Amino acid sequence: MQKTLTITRPDDWHLHLRDGDMLKAVLPETTRDFARAIIMPNLVPPVITGDDATAYRNRINALLPEGSRFTPLMTLYLTETTDPGDVTRAARTGLITALKLYPAGATTNSDSGVRDIDKVMPVLERMAKIGLPLCVHGEVTDPDVDIFDREAVFIERVLQPLQARLPALRIIMEHVTTRDGVDYVNSADNIAATITTHHLIINRNHLLVGGIKPHYYCLPIAKREAHRQALLAAATSGNPKFFLGTDSAPHTDPNKQSACGCAGVFSASNTMACLAHIFEDAGALDKLEAFTSRNGPVFYGLPPNADKITLTRHETPVAFPAKIHTGAGDVTLFDPGFALYWSTI
Ligand code: NCD
Ligand code: ZN
């Protein structure tokens, strides 16, 4: 039986749009379903200053599909030389919605990230004062720490001490992937977390068993099944501390299917279909709106979107393209590993 679900139009609280030909091709994949997105600043070179963010926002807005009312919510890439005055100006004018902390070397294009948290304390103190949230890539980069433990160790070594030092700073633990992360976010004040679509669907077996699947390789890396279950429970609970950040992160196929492949899963086009599917499976379709459209705006102090989106459950599977073609090369779309019956059109 065909059924429909109408919810407040969703937002994506963690998105990579890139630039140039790639931006042009991936932007409509997000604007089709989403009203706003937190735009990650890890371009080459990164979006560091207010002027950089203005220029990037202009490049995004210039490529919006006709009639689109999509709003890119800009972020600055926190570096050890970021000027608190520049951050304050960019926040006051409404240009930026958050800053992003990448531990140096943690992920794609993070070389200019933070090595010594002491060096960025003046900026973080200013952010706490003016109420500007900090998005955090929560993984340590210590080569002695196993890649599967990097999130849990980050909580202990960086997040807890930072929250003890600056309790007023509002933090978003981006793309949480572990039960440890979920538990920490639940136990502390002034912190929320985004969860990606793919981390709700794949565990590390999907990545590694029966041959390595480069299109499931992302950072933080997918963990064991018990962690996926914890993420799914958090996302489908309605708990306002958890909301969608797809971390849709396009890389061209040659860059993924390589002896040293890039990290990132591109899921913008079928994210809402995937989420409706897994929320329905979990008996929690009534919680989808909280996760995609309600909890994020509340944490960011923004109004929810005024318009709605209708999802339809079809009787036969909906076809999504396996790849999208961009001027920079083909980008493979996330394959959830099951047929999708939901669509947003
Ligand atoms: C992201 C990218 O490609 O920019 N990659 C990823 O695996 N998630 C960076 C990031 O968010 O870590
Ligand atoms: Zn990301």
Image (cartoon, helix red, strand yellow):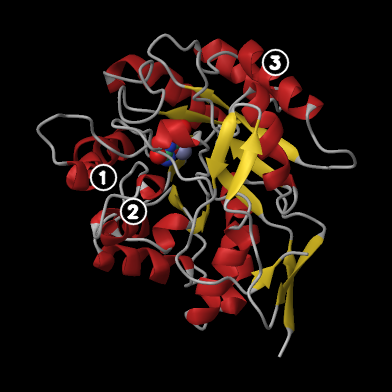
Point out the residue furthest to the bottom here. Answer: 1
Who's the residue at 61% across and 57% down the image?
A: 270
| Residue placed most toward the observer, 331 or 124 | 331
- Determine which residue is flagged by label 2: 177
Label 1 CB less than 8 angstroms from ligand 1: no
Q: Are marks 1 and 2 in contact (CB under 8 Å)?
A: yes
Q: Residue at x 55, y 79 (%)?
A: 280
Q: What percent of the width, then of the height, locates residue 92? A: 68, 24
Image height check: is 207 above or below 318? above
Q: Which circle's residue, 3 or 1, is located before the other in the chain? A: 3
Residue 212 image offset from top left, x and y in percent: 28, 49
Using the numbered discs, state the Cα–Cα distance from disc 3 to disc 1 in whole angstroms: 33 Å
Residue, disc 3? 55
Circle on res. 151 = 1
| Disc 1 to disc 2, C-alpha distance | 8 Å
Q: Residues within 10 Å of mark 3 (few under 14, many from 20)?
A: few
Residue type highlighted by circle 3:
Ala
Which one is in front, 64 or 7? 64
